[in-house]
Image: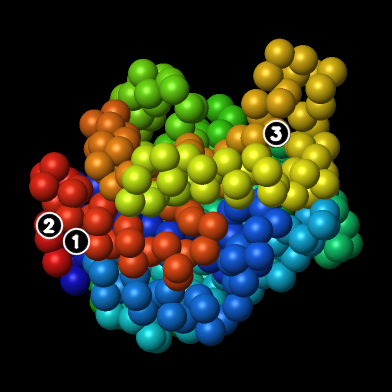
Amino acid sequence: MSMHDRLALYSRNRLKLGLFGANCSSGRAVTKVPERWSGSWDDCLRLARMADEAGIEFMLPVGRWKGYGGDTDYQGETLETVTWAAGLLGATQRLTVFGTVHAPLIHPLIAAKQFVTADHIGQGRFGLNIVCGWNEGEFDMFGATMREHAARYEHAQEWFDAIQLAWSDVDDFDLDGNFIRLRQARAKPKPYGAGRPIVMNAGASPTGQAFAIRNCDALFSMTPKGKLDEFTAHVANVKALARQGGRQIDVYTVGVITCRPMQREAEEYYRHWVIDNADWAAVDRIMAMRGVTREKYPDDFEERRYHQANGMGGIPIVGDPDAVARELAQLAAAGAKGIALSFVNYLDELPFFRNEVMPRLANLGLRETR
Ligand SMILES: Cc1cc2nc3c(=O)[nH]c(=O)nc-3n(C[C@H](O)[C@H](O)[C@H](O)COP(=O)(O)O)c2cc1C
């Protein structure tokens, strides 16, 4: 087990696959359909075992403290991500499981030790997704103030410096930051074996992306629908900036799968869950929280609403297994190292994806068969 193995997510597959958002009720689908995801521990556990068995490389949870309301209380029930990861790591063999952690809401020495503990449970399969937060209501819950945007990432830098010191071989250390002060801090044990957990971030702003480029192994970026060229340029740019700083970074993306035996069936089901049965009350609240209003975006406000309903902005991939495999291959060709997927109901839909799409990805040279 080496750092290289950790960053490769323990597989040789050219396109890594993950599941995104299963720790939350409704997952990533802002829909009222009754088969929507429960987010319960039992379902997460069954899903993780199924994913592990199928050779899926990772699971990425959403760090969410307060649900969005609406008719379904979208993401109203969420399992805390580091304890969730620890449980799933204990029950799986190959899967990398991330914790998604709000840097401003937890002391770095507590966080570093939690990550090390999860990493030992998973024998080197814990990953860290650093988030700075954007949802003011969540910060209010903690009695915490959400800093202005640039300061959020300045704080995150000090927080991550502290985590890295705690993971390093130094004995006792001090840190004198603007936000964080540590005195003779001691943190043992260190991460499992050689190396440290894979670290990712999903900043979309220049500041957020610069943070990822300076610190992370992976940047998760949304692919703009129908604009693969933009994504290709984005990947090239991020990688070039990392190289200039003497680093390497991979870019992953996010997709929402609706796959059925026939193209028409897939399109009909997509229409059913996104268009006819979206939880529009929740969608509109999320849009308002993000400051996306009809006045601000008169030309494409409706499109943005649909995009929000459909997996919170992940690229919709709708079709029969050939079409889905083809679209995933296009994302890989555009430079995506991997993709974090969601389904309306992960457990119901993963077997068909595993049986029909994954072998096609192998035929396309993107994955080994299992
Ligand atoms: C794949 C992905 C996962 C994310 N996970 C979370 C999360 O779990 N919790 C959260 O508050 N924000 C999450 N975000 C939001 C990002 O961390 C980030 O704040 C957002 O993309 C805006 O970018 P910026 O911070 O550079 O402005 C996620 C974004 C993406 C694309």
Q: Which residue is mark 2?
A: 368
Q: Which residue is mark 3?
A: 305
Q: Percent position (x, y) of residue 268?
A: 51, 43
The quadrant of the rendering that contains the C terminus is: bottom left
Whichever of callouts 1 and 3 sits on the residue coming sooner in the sequence is: 1
**Which label lies toward us, 2 or 3?**
3
Tag 1 near tag 3, CB within 8 Å:
no
Viewer-closest of 64 and 217? 64
Separation of marks 1 and 2 at Cα, in angstroms: 9 Å
Tag 1 near tag 2, CB within 8 Å:
yes
Say if residue 341 shows up in the picture. yes
Q: Quadrant of residue 234?
A: top left
Say if residue 156 shows up in the picture. no
Q: Which residue is mark 1?
A: 11
**Which label lies toward us, 1 or 3?**
3
In the rendered structure, which amino acid carries the disc numbered 3? Arg
Residue at 74% x, 50% y is 279
Q: Quadrant of residue 68?
A: bottom right
**Which label lies toward us, 1 or 2?**
2
Q: Percent position (x, y) of residue 178?
A: 70, 48
Element class at badge 2 = loop
Element class at badge 3 = helix
Vertical placement of 248 versus 261: above or below? Answer: above
